[in-house]
Image (spheres, grey):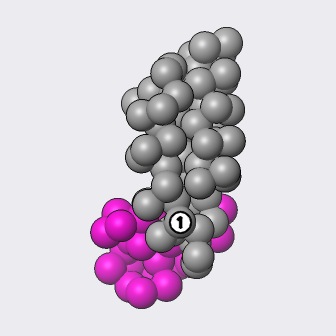
Amino acid sequence: AALARLVAEAAAEAVGSRGRFTLGLSGGSMVPLLARELPPALRAVPGSDPSRWLVAFCDERLVPPEHPESTGGAYRVS
């Protein structure tokens, strides 16, 4: 929960000052953690507007999105 709150606060600050927030996401255990904890953190932090985010997958593998090792695919289904 603390990590999700930190992300939401950083997002609100970046969106407020630069109009966008850039976030690099890894896969693995981060997927279920963020899927569970980030939505309530975003609701609690005004100005963290996810529509203003640029999200990149840092460890994406060269596999189709439906492959079990796809980071992007894992976030899509979470």
Q: Tell me the quarter of the picture where residue 7 sits.
A: top right
- As displayed, is residue 10 above or below residue 18? below
For the residue pair 31 and 52, the one nearer the viewer reads as 31
Q: Check disc 1 and report the residue beneath it.
A: 33
Quick check: 27 above or below 19? below
Q: Is residue 63 magenta?
A: yes
**Nearest to the observer: residue 15 or residue 43:** 43
Give x and y (percent) for residue 31.
51, 68
Report the magenta residues as a range. 58-78
Q: Residue at x 50, y 41 (%)?
A: 41
| Residue 29 higher or lower than 36, as above or below | below
Q: Residues within 10 Å of mark 1 (few under 14, many from 20)?
A: some
The quadrant where residue 18 appears = top right
Quadrant occupied by the C terminus: bottom left
Residue 53, compared with residue 63, is above or below; it is above
Q: Is residue 13 left or right of residue 43?
A: right
Quadrant in the picture for the N terminus: bottom right
The stretch drawn in magenta includes residue 2 = no
**Horizontal side, residue 1 vs residue 40: left or right:** right
Residue 20 falls in image quadrant: top right
